[in-house]
Image (cartoon, helix red, strand yellow):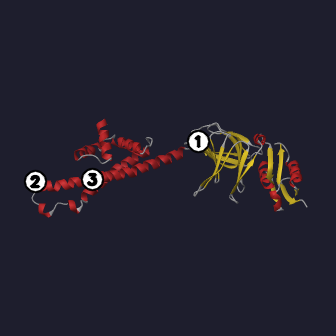
Amino acid sequence: MQAEDKKLLEKFLYGTCTAEEIHRVQELLTLADTDKVLQELTLREWNEPSNSDVQMDVIMASWKQKLHSRIADAEDQTPAEYQTPAEYQTPAEDHTTKIHEFIPRKKWYMHRYAAVWAALLFIGALAIMQLQKINREQNIKHLQFSNAKNHPVKYMLPDSSEVYLGSGSQINFSQDFVGKTRELTLQGEAFFDVKHDEKRPFIIHTGEIHTQVLGTSFKVQAFNGQPTVVAVATGKVGVSRKTCKLSQTLALLTPGHTITWNAETGKAIAGEVNLKSLQQWKTGDMVFEEQTMASIALELQHRYGVNISFIDKSVTQNQVSGTFPADKPIMKIMNILAAAGKFRYETSNQSNFKIYKTE
């Protein structure tokens, strides 16, 4: 199609064609390549990439069919104010009457034609954008990494960032980190060593808590029903709480600092962490620093596949510190914790433990 015809179609889309130009547009609508040109003009208007999918041709053909149908209906439904007045309904040889009849009908026809096409164009553009969005979403592959072992497992992410996924944990993300951000969801705990990228923030979703970085290393603990803890090893980490009603900044963390969000109390508590302990966790060592027995029991359950129940609930809040190598047997760990945490336990099969308060 020639350049001047493309410009003419563009004028028509904006409703600026003259009566003579509309006749040329009618001729162009019968050409094979007109649909493609209209598609390009529409997508350029909405700043969308070109799409050559077969479904696009179907949509364009549907628009065109509806357009001609609407025009045909319009011709049969001329408004009363544009109908030929009775005083002008004289024999066909009266040319003056024809002029009076032609002018208002021609003007009405042109505006009705342009209005119908503009409406169909807008609806069609929305259909194209929705179709493209669906196609993009369908083409995006989502991956899930999980860890059923009793020690952290290292995975490589699409941007070359590294994640050490804790026992009983999983992450979900798009295969190629499509978009302006690198986002994933985490259930459980993991240590992240994120590749720096100023243009694409790295965001971790753990329920209402969002952890965002550009490139740094840090650990996130977010088991269901437990407080969410973010601890930073290097760089800066932004932690926020986002719901459908609010967006709240909780902390901007630097190395050695933590933030703990308790959903039950609605409070965020700042704290500190030993940097060495974060690195030890990656290798499989368990490092507890003034942690409650409730959180320690949860990690032991995931790490060793055991069940720990508190007969005396007050013991859950006892705080304990300690470092245990990855290969330390569960019985030895329980003995050390019992002495430090001021409790006693019972077990018959080394898989189920009942904890009581020391009398």
Q: Position of residue 180 (x, y in %)?
A: 55, 42
Disc 1 and disc 3: Cα gap in Å? 48 Å
Of all residues shown, which one is farthest toward the right?
A: 359
The CA distance from mark 3 to mark 2 is 25 Å
Q: Residue 308, percent across and down?
A: 81, 56
Q: Please count the marks in the image.
A: 3
Residue 193 location in percent, x, y? Answer: 68, 39
Residue type at the position of mark 3 = His
Q: Which mark is residue 111?
A: 3
Mark number displayed over residue 95: 2
Q: Secondary structure at mark 3?
A: helix
278 or 251, nearer to the observer? 251
Q: Residues within 10 Å of mark 2 (few under 14, many from 20)?
A: few
What secondary structure is found at the residue carrying circle 1?
loop
Please report the residue visible at 31 percent of the width from the left and 40 percent of the height from the top: 7
Q: Quadrant of the N terminus?
A: top left
Q: What's under tag 1, amino acid-wise? A: Phe
The residue drawn where x is 83% and y is 45% is 323
Name the residue located 24 percent from the left edge and 55 percent from the top edge: 108
Please give left or right for residue 5 compared with residue 277 in the image. left
Q: Tag on residue 177?
A: 1
